[in-house]
Image: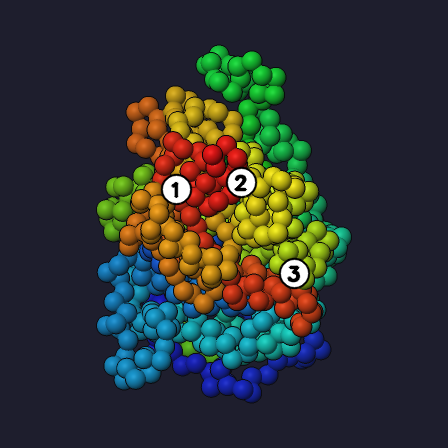
Amino acid sequence: MSAGTSSATGSQTIPAHVGSSNGALHSDSGTSSATKSIPSPHPSHIPSILSHHSSTRPAISLEFFPPKTSSGLQNLYARILRMKTQCGPSWMQVTWGAGGSTQNISMVLAGRVHKGLLRPADLDWTRWESPSSEAESRNRTLEEREIQAIIEAPANDELATECCLHLTCTNVSREALDVTLKQARAIGIRNLLALRGDPPRGSEYWTPSDNRFQHAEDLVRYIRSGHGDWFSIGVAGYPEGHTDSLTPSGEAEIPVLLSKQRAGASFIVTQLFYDVFLYHSWLAKARAAGITIPIIPGVMPIQNYTSFRRITGLCKIQVPQELRRRLEDPTPEEIASAQSSGAAAFQGKEQRDKINVRNDDARVKEVGIEWSREMCRQMWRESVKSREERGAVEETLNPNHTAFHMCTLNLEKSVTRILHDLSWAGPSQTTNKASTQEAAFAEDTSGTNGTNAADSGSATSVPKLHATLNDSLSVSAPAALWDEFTNGRYGDSRSPAFGEIDGYGVSLKVPPADALRVWRTPVTEGDISALFVAYLSGEIQAIPWCDIPILNETQAIREELLGLNRAPSASLGEGDHSTIGKGWWTVGSQPAIDGVDSLEPTFGFGPKGGYIFQKAFVEFFVDEEHMLALCRRVEEESDGLVGLLAGNKKGNFKTTLEANAVNAVTWGVFPGQEIAQSTIIEEESFKAWRDEAFEIWAEWELLFPQGSPTQRLLKSIGDNKWLVTVIHHDFKDPGALWKFLGCGRSEHLE
């Protein structure tokens, strides 16, 4: 259903107690009807959308997260426009950073999606801001002012889509939560996904801003107590158990779901999974235990092997053996094809008898599309079979697999391909009965909140929608694919998926118990240096900024990196000063490469017949004194061959590069194609990563008791160090960067 006429909500009356200090929070034993039964759904509520959706194909929801950069956000709006037309989602979901860290930007994104304000001309927020609020607006952030403008602006009915906003309750004050709920109502958002959120890692820091919000169930009950049946409230389901459990069990989570259902939850969205058999087993147990509300399976296509490994590890998700085989081993046909083509990777070396699928993002993505497509097909067939066995008619809600929740990770290709392959793409197929019900709903305004329910409009006219988006779709193919590779922190900052694409935001990427065991309790900067040296030496497999072992390409510059990371007093041995320690802790690097074959297993990428080039760069934490000295050397001694970017936790930034300069440090040249730039370093992306990098120091700090030596050390480092990136533009001299930094091997220092 379209969010249609949601602009009517701009003048709605909000209950007086919302946002006040006397909103009651029901206890588990409360007698409120909201805690005893699921409210009748409004036509815009997700259960209502499901009950009136065509039985010929499932409803689809698409999930997006707030991008890390402003340019990424603008490009996400264009991507959402394309996916709305090509995929025909029944609703979209917008995620919420832990502790409300993305509160305002999540509301902006959700509001624009819900009211269809996705094109630059759709919202002039300075125009729609009330003149009477001019003085107040000066004290608002730009995002807060934009939220107010979204509330005041009329909806674009042709582009509007129902939106479900995620909320977390831990580390969020009740006042902030009330503001969010009030804004959501004013915009016309009718669906929420109530999540607990991640608690701080140290027990001393387990002090939620409001201690009544310990679990998602508390959040569900609180929203019901203040807003009645205005919102349809979803909750998360964990078919393989919650990640906080030492021994995760999906069956053990079912009583928790029952409590959420009793508190007033009206639908469930599951965590991603890759084992359909395991999911069906859990689903049957949940239904047998009394879970009656719709359960919507979450599907996340694999985008690249690194993010897949990270997500399955964090969420403790089982990976079927067949999927592991597809990701790590080729079929005999693929091997034969590669050998017959004369690929260098297969010539003369036994260890190259297999195609390394994991390191080929395009092939990993293809495996992800195939696996997710088959999962969806299998679950939908099971759903159809179930309906036939029960003699269900089209109008009857089938609570299993009526919809699929697609986690896009802000990318376009995989989800669009899956839906097209399954013939599930195109305009949403919600029946007219929902519109009929909505009309009846609008006539009766005597509900709990006495509000106008005309906030969902009728379904968008398909011809009008296609006409509206014609200009966008005329370039949809290149626009959809330009940022599919690479999306990491060295990708294009204009991409909606810029950053580590796992959807989890800033974290240590490893469980707290493992972090304490591996990284122990450093109390001096020398201990930190030893940790980085252990990582580079292969003694440990992760550091807080990287949860995978060093890559093969890093082996080529391992000695140089060891020279940077060792404590200043360290050397290779008595009389050998070729690599003196500096105590500069590296979190990113690559060697210079001059035209290696694109099929070379360590540095190659892309199709055969290409050549790969790299400029050497390194990224490290350093104190301010050394940062300033490096800046002077770059400006005075490098003859323009070295570039530097530096920033600290306070937001300070220095660079020797020209304003808005974009530095491609990895590129490939392929027959008949434009030059492919896979690794880029520029100011906007550096600043986004700088903020994350220092947040990770703070995350690590939270593992330890407040005031302990380790906590004080990590806080001091995070507060005082600078993150520095140094690039050397001479890719034909592999030792140039390291010689400039004073950590080159002896042959580079002669």
Q: Residue at x 51, y 55 (%)?
A: 621
Picture coordinates of residue 386, whole percent (x, y): 62, 44
Disc 3 residue type?
Thr
Instruction: Write down the residue under mark 1.
Output: 728
Decide: is 342 above or below 698: above
Q: Amino acid at mark 2?
A: Glu
Between the residue at mark 2 and the residue at mark 1, the CA separation in whole angstroms equals 14 Å
Q: Would you identify the image quadrant in which residue 307 lies?
A: top right
Provide the secondary structure element on which disc 2 rests.
helix
Instruction: Point out residue 748 in the picture as x, y percentages from the top left corner.
Output: 47, 35
Q: Which residue is mark 3?
A: 524
From the viewer's side, name the closer residue of 634 and 750.
750
Q: Are marks 2 and 3 in contact (CB under 8 Å)?
A: no
Please give the residue where the numbered disc 2 appears in the rendered image.
560
> Against 677, is 102 above or below?
below
| Image position, residue 585 (x, y; %) | 55, 51
Q: Does the rendering let one see residue 731?
A: yes
**Would residue 636 be found to the left or right of residue 501 on screen?**
left
Residue 238 coordinates in the image, percent (x, y): 65, 54
Q: Which numbered disc flags the more N-terminal residue, 2 or 1?
A: 2
* Residue drawn 48% across the image and 37% down it: 749
